[in-house]
Amino acid sequence: MNNKPKNRKKWIWIGVGIVAIIIIALLAAPFIFGGQFAISKQDQITGTGDTVTAFVGDLAANASASGQVKAQRDARLASSTSGDIDKIYVALGDEVAEGDPLLKFNTDTLERAVESARQSLLIQEANHEALTAPPTASNLAAAEAAVASAQAQLDDILAGASDEDIAASEANVRAAQANAWAASEQLQLAQSGASESEIASAQANLIGALSQQDALQESYDMLTECFDIEFPDGSSHNICPGLGDPEEQTRYNLQTANANAAAAQAQLDALLAGPDSNSVSIAQASLAAANANLEAAQANHEVLLNGATAAQVANAEASLAQAEASLESLVNGPTEGQRAMSAIGVEQARISLQKAEADLANATLYAPFDGVITAVYVHEGETASGILMEIVDHNSLEVVLHVDEVDIGDIAIGQPATITLESWPDHKIDSEVTAIAPRNVRENITVVSYEVFLSLNETELPVLVGMTANANLLTNNLENVLLVPNEAINIDRNKGTYSVNLITTGDDGSQAIDEIQVTIGLRDSHNTQIIDGLNEGDKLLVGDASPVFEFSFGPGGGNGGGSPLGGGRDNQSGGGN
């Protein structure tokens, strides 16, 4: 048990000695044997890494992004009209052409509005034509007669009652008194009966009363004859030249004659019928009416004697002023302001008609362009307004990508791209960049991206709006540039430098590896562009290098030798002898 440690130490020292002898022998071999020392290139590469060659070729850089299929042209269709949906002509998914009817509102109310607006326009046009037309001779004559009549009425009022008027009024009072007396006698007769002489007298009174009634009625009809005057603005005015004090006095006289005739007839009838309760009642009523007429005649006579009141004068003056203004307007025609207002009224009526017709036309919703109906929000019979349908133009589909702001600088309009859809990942569609949004889209607090638009060329695939799309964009393309495989590049991230392991061959055929810095340019998934530091055909070592020796012996001697290969790929510092 105690001899084992000693034996172990013994064998360790023996091993160390053997290694030392071998190293010394290797170092001394060139001098002892006088042979040539060299490294076999093939053995070196095979044992420690791969060799690549710098070459001239083409390089393309790509960027990838994802997005969605969208339509350049779509629309949410609404109508300015609201009401009950009468008919829907399309359904979800239907293809329509520009101008095709999509739905129609009930138009009963709208059609009535159009007809009403049309009638209003006709009325306004007729009024405007009448206003601007020159006056006719008959209109001028009627207007002049109206002025003359108003002037005469005013003159009569200002002049006061004439002797003839006073006499007529007094006669009217006396007639009223006579009627009252006759009514009183009639009542007495009704109460007591009548003799033959009384009946004969009553018959004579009736004949006289009827004769007076007819004469006064004829006079009154002549005084109250009137006629109408039409003005350019469509209005008319009724002119009664005989109205005034003569007509008023004649009317009172006629009322008295009527009352007298009625009283005479009643008196005769009562006498002939003999006394009865009805006759007495009638006689009493006649007496009351006769007394009322007497009071009215007396009151009118008093007014006539006292002259016209201020209100009557004012009314007469106003009537004259109105008649004169109407005549002046007829002679001079409408003013510029009246013409303008009338023309405005016509134009407003025309605009109202146009609006009503537009509302009726808008009651039918039409397709604004060729496309596919993607949504229908209403049903027939519903009361609807606002958004009614949605339509998409499938001939305007495009792909919209969201590209990070870090990569947006590599994207340019016109760059070629290849699109694949998630639904058909193996089918590639050629495309190109058509537009880049000038404003970013902030997806969250830290991520900022820009929308990039790609054309979507015709394809047999049934592409739908909203599908997910992946795009590969060719961001750069270089031709006839110096390239090396990406794995040949050593990166010192601390220093921000790039280097390669260059294999050099000496005049004696020996090879060495030197790590040299290079300037790189564009790179893709396979190769990197070398801007400076290498030449076409340079050999590079990929991977780590360690000293591997192979001896060859030949005649002769000397101190020939080679440099040991050293240094390997070091991403931090690099190195070489």
Image: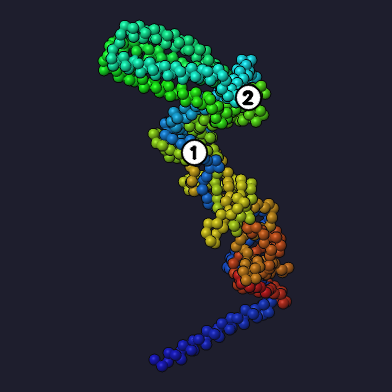
Indicate the amino acid at tag 1. Ala
Quadrant in the rendering for residue 24:
bottom right
- Toward the left, the furthest residue is 276
Dot in front, 1 or 2:
2
Which residue occupies 42% across, 9% down?
208
Crowdedness near tag 2: few (<14), some (14–19) or many (≥20) residues, C-alpha within 10 Å: some
Q: How many marks?
A: 2
Crowdedness near tag 1: few (<14), some (14–19) or many (≥20) residues, C-alpha within 10 Å: some
- Toward the bottom, the furthest residue is 2
Q: Position of residue 442 (x, y in %)?
A: 55, 57
Cα–Cα span, label 1 and label 2:
59 Å
Which residue occupies 70% across, 58% down?
536
- Left or right side of 389 for 63: right
Foreground pick, 252 / 400: 252
Q: Is residue 568 visible?
A: no
Q: Is residue 576 visible?
A: yes
Indicate the amino acid at tag 2. Glu
Q: Quadrant of the N terminus?
A: bottom left
Q: Position of residue 150 (x, y in %)?
A: 59, 22
The answer to whether marks 1 and 2 mark residues whose Cβ atoms lie closer than 8 Å is: no
Which residue occupies 56% across, 31% down?
310
Residue tagged 1: 78
Find numbered disc 1 in the image and state the secondary structure of the residue it sits on. strand
Residue tagged 2: 324
On residue 559, the disc is none
Asked which colour scheme the image uses, the reply is rainbow
Foreground pick, 55 / 230: 230
Q: Earlier in the sequence, mark 1 or mark 2?
A: 1
- Left or right side of 216 for 54: right
Q: Position of residue 135 (x, y in %)?
A: 64, 19
Quadrant in the rendering for residue 385:
top left
Depicted 34 relative to depicted 347: above or below? below
